[in-house]
C-alpha cells in the first residue's frame, strides 16, 4: 500500500494548494469586484484537478491495489475514476467543512483504503408518514423507529452540504420534511461489485410477484403497522369513523442513504408533491391521525404484539407460512391503495387466508370469516351478510360490470376491518404455536393452514387427525384476539 499512499498524499497536497489559492480576494475588472458562484467555481476547480497528473497517478495506483478477479474487477478506467471522484466529494474533502474537521491526511488515506476493501454498507431508509402526528418525537421498536427530525438532522443524514455542490439531485428538502414523522430502518447491505455483470430473472423475461413498491426493509415494518386499527388509536376528530377522509397514514416515497463513500447518492423525490403538504403559505402538513398520549400507548402496544408474533414466525426467511406472507403483502397493498381498488386487495388477502380451490368458495369464505369475527350467532350472521355484499362488489369490479350505485365508504372500511382482523387471527394463533415449537414444547407435527380451516368448519371427520392441535389450542379459540386499545 506504500505506492498508493504516496500517490494519495501527493494528490491531497495538490488539492490544498489549489484550494488555498481559491481563498484569495476576488479580482476586479474596471473597478468592479467579480464575485464568482462559489459552488460552480469549486466544481470547475475539482474537474481541473481530476484531469491533472496527480489524480491520474492516484487512479493508476488505486486500480493496481484494488482490482481483483473475485471482487472489483472492472477494467474501465472511467468507472474507477468515478469511484475516486465520489470519494473526495462525499467525504467533504473539497468543502470547507473538511478543513474545519478532525480528519488528517493519515485518517483520510485509511478511510480511502477501507472504502475499496469493504464488502457491506450501512443503509438507512427514511419513509415519511403523511397525515400522522404523535405527541413525542421518537418511538422505538425492535429493528426500527418512528421519529421526527429537525432541519439540521436531516441535512446531516442526507449529506446536503456536499450534495448542494456536487449532487444537487440528491438534496433533501428539509424545510418540508422536518414537519413529518419517519419510519426509520437501518440495515447492512451487500456492496455491489464493479465489473461484474449481474443478469436478473427480469432481464431474462421473467416477472416476479411484487405486491408493493416499498423496499423489503420498509415492507417488514409495514407488516407490523398495518395490523393496527388507525381509526381506533387516533385522537377523536370525527363523530363517525366512516367519515374519516382516510383509513390510515400514507407513505408517498422512501428515501435511502448509505455510508458508501464510492457511490453517488440516490436522487431524491419532489417533496412538494406530498398529498398532506399545505404549501408555502403554511409550511405544515395536514393531520388526520393526531394521536394523543393514550392513543400512542395503544399504538405502541399493538405494534409490539405484532412484532412478537411475526418475530416468532419469521415470514421474511421462512416459507412455512407462505400463505400468511401473501395475505399480509396484499393487506399492505390495500392499505396504500386509493378508492375502490383497496376492496380488491382486501378480499384477495382474505382468500389467501381462508380460501380453498373447489366449489362453494364464496360460502366458505363468508362462513369462516364470520366464525372468526363474530362472538355470537347474530354477530356471525351479520358478518356473513357483510362479506357477501363486499364479495358481490369485488366480483363486479373484477368482471367489469357497471355499478348501479356508488359504493359507500362504510363498505370499504368494513373490508379493511375484516381483512385486518382475520389476518391478526392467523398471526396470533400461528405465532402462539410457533413459540411452543421453538421452545420444544410442541411434540406433534406443526399444524397447517388447512388444519385450522378444518377446525373453523367444525369438521368431525378431521377430529382424530387434529387431536394434538385440539388439545393444545391457545386460549380463546376460535375467537379473534383483541388488539384494539
Image (cartoon, rainbow, N blue to C red):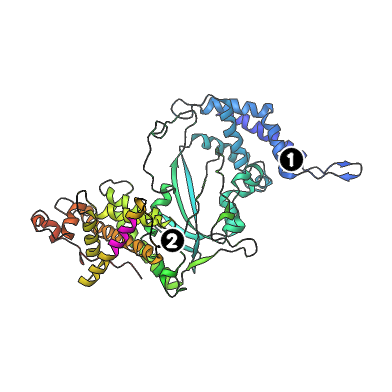
Q: Are marks 2 and 1 in contact (CB under 8 Å)?
A: no
Q: Is residue 159 left or right of residue 417?
A: right
The percent position of residue 59, horizontal first and vertical second, equals 60, 28
Q: How many marks?
A: 2
Looking at the image, residue 243 lies above or below residue 432: below
* Residue drawn at 59 percent across, 58 percent down: 176
Q: Which residue is mark 2?
A: 140
Q: Earlier in the sequence, mark 2 or mark 1?
A: 1
Quarter of image, res 58: top right
Quadrant in the rendering for residue 119: top left
Residue 314 seen in render:
no
Quarter occupied by residue 279: bottom right
Q: Which residue is mark 1?
A: 41
Please state the horizontal and vertical placement of residue 250, each as a whole percent of the image: 47, 58
Tell me if I can see residue 97 in this picture: yes
Give the x, y percent position of residue 459: 12, 58
Q: Quadrant of the N terminus?
A: top right
Horizontal side, residue 104 vs residue 38: left or right: left
Magenta-colored span: 386-394
| Residue at (56% x, 36% y) in the render | 112
Question: Nearest the camera: 372 or 57?
Answer: 372
Q: Is residue 285 left or right of residue 434?
A: right
Q: Nearer the viewer, residue 146 or 117?
A: 146
Secondary structure, magenta segment, majority class? helix
For residue 260, above or below residue 336: above
* Above or below, 114 relative to 228: above
Name the quadrant of the C terminus: bottom left
Calculate the distance from the C-alpha at mark 2 to the C-alpha at mark 1: 44 Å
Amino acid at each position: 500500500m506504500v505506492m498508493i499512499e504516496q500517490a494519495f498524499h501527493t494528490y491531497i497536497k495538490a488539492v490544498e494548494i489549489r484550494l488555498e489559492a481559491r481563498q484569495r480576494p476576488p479580482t476586479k475588472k474596471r473597478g468592479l469586484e467579480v464575485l464568482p458562484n462559489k459552488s460552480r467555481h469549486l466544481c470547475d476547480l475539482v474537474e481541473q484537478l481530476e484531469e491533472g497528473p496527480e489524480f491520474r497517478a492516484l487512479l493508476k495506483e488505486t486500480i493496481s491495489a484494488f482490482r481483483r478477479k473475485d471482487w472489483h474487477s472492472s477494467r474501465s478506467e472511467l468507472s474507477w475514476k468515478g469511484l475516486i471522484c465520489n470519494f473526495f466529494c462525499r467525504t467533504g474533502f473539497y468543502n470547507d467543512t473538511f478543513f474545519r474537521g478532525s480528519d488528517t491526511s493519515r485518517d483520510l488515506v485509511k478511510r480511502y483504503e477501507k472504502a475499496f476493501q469493504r464488502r457491506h454498507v450501512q443503509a438507512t431508509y427514511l419513509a415519511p408518514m403523511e397525515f400522522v402526528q404523535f405527541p413525542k418525537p421518537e418511538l422505538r421498536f425492535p429493528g426500527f423507529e418512528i421519529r421526527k427530525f429537525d432541519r439540521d438532522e436531516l441535512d446531516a443524514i442526507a449529506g446536503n452540504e456536499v450534495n448542494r455542490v456536487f449532487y444537487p439531485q440528491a438534496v433533501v428538502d428539509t424545510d418540508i420534511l422536518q414537519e413529518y414523522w419517519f419510519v426509520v430502518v437501518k440495515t447492512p447491505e451487500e456492496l455491489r461489485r464493479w465489473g461484474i455483470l449481474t443478469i436478473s430473472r427480469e432481464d431474462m423475461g421473467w416477472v416476479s410477484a411484487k405486491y408493493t413498491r416499498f423496499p423489503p426493509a420498509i415492507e417488514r415494518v409495514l407488516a407490523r403497522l398495518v395490523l393496527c386499527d388507525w381509526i381506533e388509536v387516533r385522537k377523536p376528530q370525527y363523530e363517525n369513523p366512516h367519515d374519516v377522509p382516510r383509513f390510515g397514514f400514507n407513505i408517498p416515497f422512501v428515501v435511502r442513504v448509505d455510508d458508501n463513500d464510492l457511490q453517488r447518492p440516490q436522487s431524491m423525490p419532489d417533496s412538494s408533491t406530498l398529498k398532506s403538504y399545505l404549501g408555502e403559505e403554511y409550511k405544515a402538513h395536514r393531520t388526520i391521525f393526531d394521536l394523543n398520549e393514550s392513543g400512542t400507548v395503544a399504538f405502541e402496544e399493538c405494534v409490539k404484539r405484532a412484532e412478537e408474533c411475526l418475530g416468532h414466525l419469521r415470514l421474511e426467511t421462512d416459507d412455512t407460512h407462505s400463505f400468511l406472507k401473501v395475505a399480509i403483502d396484499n393487506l399492505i397493498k390495500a392499505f396504500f391503495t386509493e378508492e375502490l381498488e383497496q376492496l380488491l386487495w382486501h378480499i384477495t388477502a382474505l382468500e389467501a387466508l381462508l380460501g380453498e380451490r373447489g366449489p362453494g368458495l364464496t360460502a366458505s369464505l363468508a362462513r369462516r370469516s364470520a366464525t372468526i369475527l363474530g362472538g355470537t350467532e347474530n354477530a356471525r350472521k351479520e358478518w356473513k351478510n357483510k362479506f357477501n355484499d363486499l364479495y358481490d362488489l369485488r366480483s363486479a369490479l373484477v368482471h367489469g360490470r357497471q355499478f348501479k350505485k356508488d359504493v359507500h365508504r362504510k363498505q370499504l372500511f368494513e373490508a379493511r376491518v375484516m381483512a385486518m382482523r382475520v389476518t391478526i387471527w392467523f398471526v396470533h394463533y400461528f405465532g402462539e404455536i410457533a413459540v411452543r415449537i421453538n421452545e420444544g414444547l410442541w411434540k406433534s407435527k406443526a399444524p397447517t393452514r388447512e388444519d385450522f380451516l378444518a377446525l373453523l368448519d367444525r369438521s368431525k371427520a378431521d377430529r382424530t387427525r387434529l387431536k394434538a392441535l385440539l388439545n393444545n389450542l391457545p386460549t380463546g379459540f376460535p375467537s379473534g384476539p383483541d388488539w384494539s386499545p
